[in-house]
Image (cartoon, coloured by chain):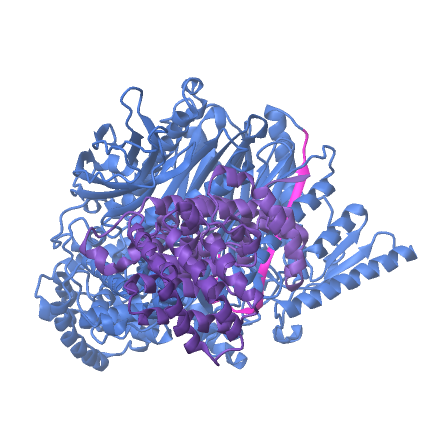
Amino acid sequence: MAVELDVFVGNTTIMDEEVYQLWLDGYTVNDAVRARMEGGVLDEFDATADVLLSDTMDQYRTFQMCERLLHSPAKLANQLLFQIPPHRQTMLIERYYAFDDVFVREVLGKKLSKGTKKDLDDISAKTGVTLKSCRRQFDNFKRIFKVVEELKGPLVENIRQHFLLSDKLARDYAAIVFFANNRFETGKKKLQYITFQDFAFCAGQLINNWTVGAVGEGLCKTKNNMVEDMDVDLDKEFLQELKELKVLITDKDLLDQHKSLVCTALRGKTKAFNEMEANFKNLSRGLVNIATKLTNTKDVRDFFIDLVEKFIEPCRSDRWTAADVKLYLTHYTNSAHILDTFKHQVVWDRYMGVIKSCIFKMYHD
Amino acid sequence: MPGKLKAKIVAGRHLPVMDRASDLTDAFVEVKFGNTTFKTDVCPKSLNPQWNSEWFKFEVDDEDLQDEPLQITVLDHDTYSANDAIGKVYIDIDPLLCTEAASIISGWFPIYDTIHGIRGEINVLVKVELFNDLNRFRQSSCGVKFFCTTSIPYSYRAVMVHGFVEELVVNEDPEYQWIDRIRTPRASNEARQRLISLMSGELQRKIGLKVLEMGGNAVVGYLQCFDLEGESGLVVRAIGTACTLEKFSSGSASITCPHPSTAPPSNACNSPKDGKELVFGEELPLSSGPPTPFRALPSSSSSPPPFSPSKPCSRQSSSSDTDLSLTPKTEEPLSVRRRPGIFLCPSSPILSADTLSLPGSGPAGCGHGSAHRATTPALPFSTQSDSALLRKSVSFTEDLLLAASGMGSGGSAGKEAGPLKTLLRQQTQTTLEQRGASSSGLLLNAREFPFFTLTSFPPGFLVHVGGVVSARSVKLLDRIHNPDEPETRDAWWEEIRQEIKSHAKALGCHAVVGYSENTSICEEVCILSASGTAAILNPRYMREGCLDVGSIDHRFDDPSPPNCGFCHIPYDELNMPFPAQLAYCYQCRRQKVPDVLFTTIDLPAEAAVTGKGCLIQARLCRLKKKAQGEVNATAISNLLPFMEYELHTQLMNKLKLRSMNALFGLHIQISVGENMLLGLASATGVYLTALPAPGGIQIAGKTPGDLNNEQHVAAIQKRINDAIAKNKELYQINPPELTDEGVGSPIPEPRQRSRIFRSHSESSDELSELDLSHGKKDAFVLEIDDTDAVEDIHSLLTDAPPPAGFHSCSTETMPGIYNWTSGIQMFTSVRVLRLNNTNLTNQGLNKIFTDLCENLLKSFYFKLRSTVPCCLCHLNFTVAVPEEELVQVSVTAVAMTFDKDQNQEKPPEKATTKGGSETEDQLQFPLELSADSSSTSPQPSKISGVAENTIVSTRAVSVDYGSFADRCSTWLELLRLKAHTIRRGSVKTSRRTQSLAHSVSSLEHCSPLPEGRSRSLCSSRSFGVGSVTMVKMTPLSFLPGTRIIKYLGIINMFFIRETTSLREEGGVSGFLHSFIAEVFAMVRAHVAALGGNAVVSYSMKDCVLMENPNKNQAQCLINVSGDAVICVRETDQEQTTNTGQTCGTIDGAT
């Protein structure tokens, strides 16, 4: 005696959020049943394991049938197969595209290719996220990457419109796409302490300030409204201009002048003053060098590792507090404006604005 | 006469990729009707093609319009090879043929392929221009309305119930034709789908013709079934109840209206209204409408002269609703409703004049005079027709007399004829107002079979209920040689119906209500079953009886004495058809009632119930030897009586165990398989206040001397007693304590107490009438004589009650729950069990089967746990034995939420529920009657009434000249307006992109309608870009918290799905799951395209699944039906109306 067939179909599709999550997390039906039993559904509601199994199977089937639609969320709204109230649709999409930070941290900056996909089992083992869930998340990244790649216009907006995601999630995906596109190195040991959210923040800064799209809405709109990949690629012109910043470290006078201005401003305001004074030239060289090298794709990839090596690590070894870093960078940036021979104020601001906020984010006490 | 069918193909979306190379599709569409085919251009390389075709026009006979579906095929153009079919859409255009239903079909339809399922969607527009058919010999029956609903549909009033209509058509099953060997599965499936669609169209048309012949304009309780007889063919049969219905447009609206007004002139020449008017003989000479077949009919038997008065009243209400706001349906309207009764305005104003000359007796003057004067201002006219009218009524009543005596033949005939005669005499001799009263009338025709597929009735219709009558017969199928002469099948059914009729007669009843027929086929054996409830119908009689009851019953202190009449025995006490224990009715104490009552109908709205009801099921398996042909048939027919007997025993025991005394909505199904028979009986048990309290169950040991045994027996007895006590509490059954002496019931000697329950001595012949025969003792004795009996008792006790917060019933609503909220969730569930164990015993099988059903219920409760408190209504179980060793149970039901806090209190709320509103719709007649009779003297009152009416009517005439259709379109307009506002609201929603969570909430705010419902109704259409109309589905005839404002037509669809990649689709479960979801989607799409937002009386008639996992194949056939409707929230409607009135305050309202 065996149940050969067992289905339950509601006119309004019944979906249990808890089971959905288990499904998304890649639980097998049996694991899901176990998890639910441990979760205590049976206690609240007098039911047997059979009932739970049957319910879980039904739900899993429903989700599997829905999955195709979730791949292009816009379809979910006007498909006819499942009658799902709009707020449930939103929930389904949002959850489907949600990802684990630990997982995304692993693939961040990697090429979203078959090769990477093959490594997913390692990542799964490392992060504890089930392989199935890893695949879903990876495929989501790839799908969004592919769709957005072909679209013009602002990245976040495109993601939001095509995948009907919340603002937060759309921004995170924008970061992922941005990292994947520029292939930023994030896997080095030195970078391990930086969380995905830190990186996402930095990506946001870069997208908003250093890309073609960022040059400003004003500029772009007057010209050819939509530049391809305007949010995904860094602004080449800007990167060229960054080379001009080199004067800050090559011109000895300028460097000394800059140092004295910064030190004057900092004196007495921090315990780490001595270290700051001592390290000023090193740190300044580090930051300016990063700027000047950004025309090389290779160096772009190393952007974050450079920041860590050239700035964050020295500071940390001198036990600067986050406040110290903030203070230092603020004065460091502002003092450059007072240098009368330094002519590249605009570029400097555009550069340092991002560097400053990235370092703040990446500098963990 | 021809009609012109026009179709336009607008666009497609989500098409599948047909060209692997480009990942795109070059789609075009073929539109076919009859033998004419049109094609659109190819829309190259697109998955979302825009064809925007011209209007394709088909000029066709209306006969074809009724039979044929519009067939739309989407194909992928291929330059070099044959074009690949993507899928098809069949559109039944029947709803467009009825002026009162939909006027256009427009919307997105899923493109369906029998192999691949839904593959994208297509947007289609369909219209019909129909020319009126003047030919009396026509073969079409356009305009006859069909309803699956088994009660008088909302916003309609039955002017007359003509009676039973049935028809069947047969054909060869394409699946079994020789050609099937060479064609693809797809072609075969499509041939079958098309054939069945044609056959059901034809069937509907033929039934429509019969209805027209009878003088009706609608079929209510239309029940269509397919018998897949395999080799021997395909039978499509249908039964229904022919009625003359009349639209009362939103009834409650009229009530607050102080102006009863004259009717709007009917200008739509094809309007059924015209047809109806013509039914009334008196109009003939005057009618300005085009002639219709009605006129040509000899009106003798079916002409309903007495009913003309009712028409004005409906008119009145309909007209008034346009100029006035609505009040919710409550009792208050009832009183106002009386007015229509008095206010006799003949159907068309022109006619009213004739009333003057009416040679009627005194009292007639009252109603009549007022009518006359009311209309006079509008029109002056000829007098003569009135005599015609009266003459008609006389002749009619004679017919009725005949009918009555014919029906009540046998012992009860005299008794029955008595009241009828009185009624008739009154009708003929007295007055118009009485005619008004009798127009509640619903009159029986002298028909061959006085059967009614209705399960719930206007109050007053049902006089007495005798009990369940059923008949089964086992037939051997043979090939249908000539499809045009389906005599054999007809004869079979004829036979069964005769039997039912005679059973009813034996119960002293002249009619059968809640009648249904079904079949179970296995190989060449077919079990035909029919069942219903024997009853006596007569509004008039009912009315009087109840008045008596009311006056005597005062000491019960019931504000409104409940009607208990239907419980009273219809048969002669001294000459009972079977032994039953009678008692005086516990409510009126004047009439006898049986101790137990089984019926197939819904609980009458007026019935008084103690506590709550519950689902009661009896389940039974019987093994049988495999055999062929006649031997097999004989074996089966030998088993049947025993099965019925045991099912009844189980039902009775379970009923007693729950301390209840009546079953409603009883449905017994016996399914035949190769090596077993399955029986499943479902019903809703209740405690009818009018019936005596059920006795307990006594356990008796076979060998009294054995001490051990006795202890065992005592233990079981205790468990049973405990269970009964617990159930009493659970279902809140606390009947008023009445001593038997007080009731004065002559309880017979307990001589039969010791009857052994499991005896097989009953002759099987009796069985079909057996139902009540168990009722002869007040305590059941279950004798434990063998292990079987022990098992039985155990199974009795293992039926788990639903978990807290849940209720379940097989009827439309749960007796004892009245305050439904609007949340509903319809579902279909199918479970198939494979019995691997080859040597099973009956007992083992029973256990398995019982567990299967119980587990299904448990699953439902679990899945729907978030909706508590809720009730699973209309739990409809269907069992089948698709193959040897397989047991299939399919269930369709709806979970409805209700408000827990108030569920104790009763009636005022009731008005909002179905029962209530029905009362309101139809009660008017009894009330009118009382109004009439109270004012029998009434010269003075007449005058005042007249004055009022006069003023009002003139005014109304000027206001309300819209035809019904117009009004409907206004409704649509309003809905659309409403949708607009919401769309305006959802502009905010489009900001969703900015902040999702926020937008959702803002949406909620800007939507004028609270939560869920708002989405599902008007709003959903406009919800964001390209979103889909929410369509509610329910097996019930109503949606709680809403009001049905329009019936758009019947949905009757048949689908086949087949797969050759079963594993890839997730096994049988995956396959069926997606198929059912697809069927739902297609039903919803059709309803939405008709402009509707809900399906009521939805049912899945067939779900035939065949699988062959080894070959990785499966095939499934599903047949569904229901009524497409537009409904609006009850509170909303007021709003809408108001808005409509003030034309532009919509923003305010929203």
Asked if residue B7 is positioned above or below residue B532 in the image, the reply reads above
Figure chain in purple: A
User: Is residue A287 highlighted in magenta?
Assistant: no
Q: Where is residue A140 in the image (x, y as percent from the top left)?
A: 46, 47
Q: Position of residue B781 (x, y in %)?
A: 75, 57
Q: Total label count?
A: 0
Asked if residue A9 is positioned above or below residue B663 in the image, the reply reads above
On screen, residue B648 versus residue B1061, left or right, reads right
Figure chain in blue: B
Q: Looking at the rendering, in which quadrant would you find the C terminus of chain A?
A: bottom right
Asked if residue B510 is positioned above or below residue B331 in the image, the reply reads above
B786 and B780: which one is in front? B786
B403 and A47: which one is in front? A47
Q: Residue B375 falls in which quadrant of the image? A: bottom left
Residue B914 visible in the picture: no
Task: Read off the magenta span.
Answer: B602-625
Q: Residue B1022 falls in which quadrant of the image? A: bottom left
Q: Is the magenta stretch mostly helix, strand or loop?
A: strand
**Furthest residue to the front?**
A253
Residue B50 visible in the picture: yes
Q: Residue at x 52, y 53 (%)?
A: A105
On screen, residue B1005 versus residue B410, left or right, reads left
On screen, residue B332 versus residue B371, left or right, reads right
B260 and B102: which one is in front? B102
Q: Looking at the rendering, in which quadrant would you find the N terminus of chain A?
A: top right
